[in-house]
Image (cartoon, rainbow, N blue to C red):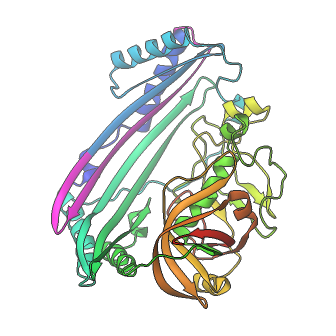
Amino acid sequence: MKPTIHDSLPFPDDDSLKNLVAETLAMAQAAGASQAEAGLSVSQGLSVGSRMGEVETIEHQQDNGLGISVYFGRHKGSASTSNLDPDAIRRTVEAACNIARYTSEDPCTGLADAALMATEFHALDLYHPWKLEPQAVIDLALECENAALSHDPRIVNSEGAAVDLNAGVSVYGNSHGFLQAQHKTRHGISCSVVAESGGNMQRDYWYDVSRNPDALASARSVGEKAAERTVRRLDASKLKTTQAPVLYAPEMARGLVGHLTSAIGGAAQYRKASFLLDALGEQVFPDFVQLREDPFLAQALGSANYDSEGVATRATPLVSDGVIQHYLLDSYAARKLGRESTGHASGVHNLMLDSTGKTFSECLAAMNRGFLVTELMGQGINTVTGDYSRGAAGFWVENGQIDRPVEEVTIASNLREMFRGIVEIGNDIDQRGSIRCGSILIENMTIGGVD
């Protein structure tokens, strides 16, 4: 049997990796640190890219990394290394200790509270190596791109197709006695092509990503979807500036949820740099909006038993009946705010926005006349005021049906008004990330085009 990418570079066993982290922590404490934490990661992967029927890139990755943070009272020092030899680790610990001796005292620094460490561990089923020979990975990339290029004669060029395989193990430990290892995989297929008609050129893309290769869309279907999305954008026109409803396609809608999570994040709150400052308990959305977090979904991209500080994650309602229920806090932000860590030192864990029950077609019908957003450009968002203005492309909708492609417009409003103006949340849920939601229909926005 020929070796596969995952057979050729076996990981060290968990006990060896845990011992390495434990020894690192012991070095820090022997050097006088009152507290210490260390994270170790080992990963390997293969990425293949093709363009116009030719293999363009083949990249094999094998990465190691160890990071250590030490605390001398309320003084913190951090250092990292990619060299896992004992002497390199010793020098890294010494560097972290030297840094800590010169940093300013911060009363909020330190490990997360010992009482918050995870003690129960769900079987999350996050490790599914894709055991392919390198040639099979190449064949998948070529198949994906060829499916796009042959889908329609108007597809005239390609920005490439890619297939990525990745597997890794991470270990986190701290001087509270917490020491755990977690194995994860992440695989993806993507494609981007260019179409032309009458001198007008458009590009679009599609992708899929999963921890389990058996759950991925086929390479052919990813390529065909990329081609379909590209062709439908041909002969796009501009709009006159107007006010109208806006429907965010699912892959764009998750960005709106992301603006919420940034605004209720601990750093934005304690820095007083949020348009939702002190919004805990405030009704920000219509009362049908429910946003919840479930860190324990099997095979999900955002699943985790603990965050990057060892704090236990938990199923949490973030928005109930439109009301903000929780901030997203790591231990530092929690102390700054006089609160307790919520287990979000490493971000959110499978946020799910409940649908109002309508399909995508029914959301179009509910909008009747307006703008469907399928692409966003630029970063015109003021996180302090909530002012929102972004370049966009998509489709104009008439009588609940897609009428024509649209490009070079700007959509603008304020995020508070947008959140209050949510009319529907579709059941066409995009599961390719830590935020899962369907299409979101906003009652009214300014659509800037030509005057």
Image quarter hosting the C terminus: bottom right
Percent of width and height locating residue 265: 67, 44
Q: Quadrant of residue 390?
A: bottom right
Is residue 57 one of those drawn in magenta? yes
Image quarter hosting the N terminus: bottom left
Percent of width and height locating residue 410: 54, 65
Residue furthest out toward the bottom: 399
- Kindly identify the residue that appears in the image at 74 percent across and 48 percent down: 276
Residue 168 or 411: which is nearer the viewer?
411
Is residue 147 one of those drawn in magenta? no
Residue furthest out toward the left: 54
Q: Is residue 235 above or below residue 425?
A: below
Q: How many dots with numbers?
A: 0
Q: Is residue 402 visible?
A: yes
| Residue 90 falls left or right of residue 105 | left
Magenta segment: 31-60
Q: Is residue 119 visible?
A: no
Percent of width and height locating residue 26: 51, 16
| Residue 229 falls left or right of residue 172 | left
Q: Is residue 46 above or below residue 402?
A: above
Residue 170 or 234: which is nearer the viewer?
234
Q: Tell me which secondary structure the magenta stretch mostly adopts.
A: strand
Q: Is residue 225 above or below residue 182?
A: below
Percent of width and height locating residue 361: 58, 86
| Residue 197 falls left or right of residue 245 | left
